[in-house]
Amino acid sequence: MAAKEKSKLGVIEGTLVYAKVGQPDNKYQSTEKEWSIEVIVSEEIADEWDEQFKKQPSKKIKASDFSAKYKIDLPEHLKGEKSVYGIKLKRQATNDGEPVDESFRPKIYIDDADGNRTECGQSRLIANGSFGKVSYFISTNDFGTFSRLQNVLMKEEDFIEYESKSSGGGAEFGEAKSVKYEEPKESVMKTRAEKPAPKKVVEQDDSNEETEPSPF
């Protein structure tokens, strides 16, 4: 059995894309689920990452392909670069199809201008182009050094909330700037009295009676 060392924590900062932190998604070609997020960084930061996590290297992305791939503009601080790099951090969400304990769910934190911190991992989604920090566990064994997604922190002004543009939200009337949904109110839901169920009608067999021919 491979020897295992005590985990340590690390933090990486960059532009956030493909965030699946509040709700996990299927692993590649698997029914097991995982939480994940990708951090876009410079070549210098990517080189440092690749040196430490040789089994989890960064992904090189041509700057000219960035907008088409992520549907956002190239981050301002990376403009002028020929290539940028994506670092993906993941954490297992199911084990043999069973969800892991809730305490293992990565948390999403937002800091406001007054220094207040809010955890919103299950109420808001991170859109591509948000900027923040991602913490991760570092563990080393005989097979190498590995990272595992921990939490995400963003400043309020750097957070972009993802809003679905699916077929819902009255899309047939044209695109809206945003669509928000209010919680149902009991007083409204019970405003209309329920209609009594219609009485069951037993059809009479008139097959032996003479009837007028149908015009249809």
Image (cartoon, rainbow, N blue to C red):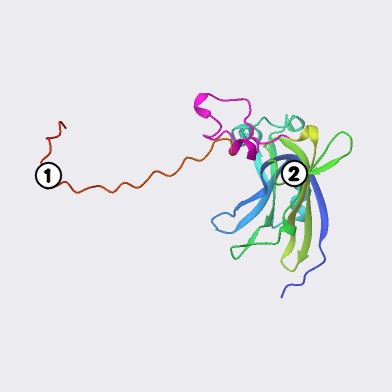
SS state under label 2: loop
Please tell me whether residue 110 belongs to the stretch shown in magenta: no
Query: Could you tell me which residue is drawn at 60 percent across and 66 percent down?
Result: 96
Q: In this view, does 154 lie to the left or right of 82?
A: right
Query: Could you tell me which residue is drawn at 37 percent across and 45 percent down?
Result: 199
Picture coordinates of residue 122, whole percent (x, y): 70, 46
Picture coordinates of residue 114, whole percent (x, y): 89, 35
Q: Name the residue under label 1.
A: 209
Residue bounds of the magenta highlight: 160-189
Quadrant of the drawing holding the C terminus: top left
Give whichever of discs 2 and 1 has the lower sequence position: 2
**Label 2 is placed on what type of residue?**
Cys
Query: Could you tell me which residue is drawn at 14 percent across and 47 percent down?
Result: 207
Picture coordinates of residue 18, whole percent (x, y): 65, 43
* Mark 2 residue crowding within 10 angstroms, few (<14) / some (14–19) / many (20+): few
Please tell me whether residue 178 belongs to the stretch shown in magenta: yes
Q: Name the residue under label 2.
A: 120
Task: Give the image quarter of residue 130.
Answer: top right
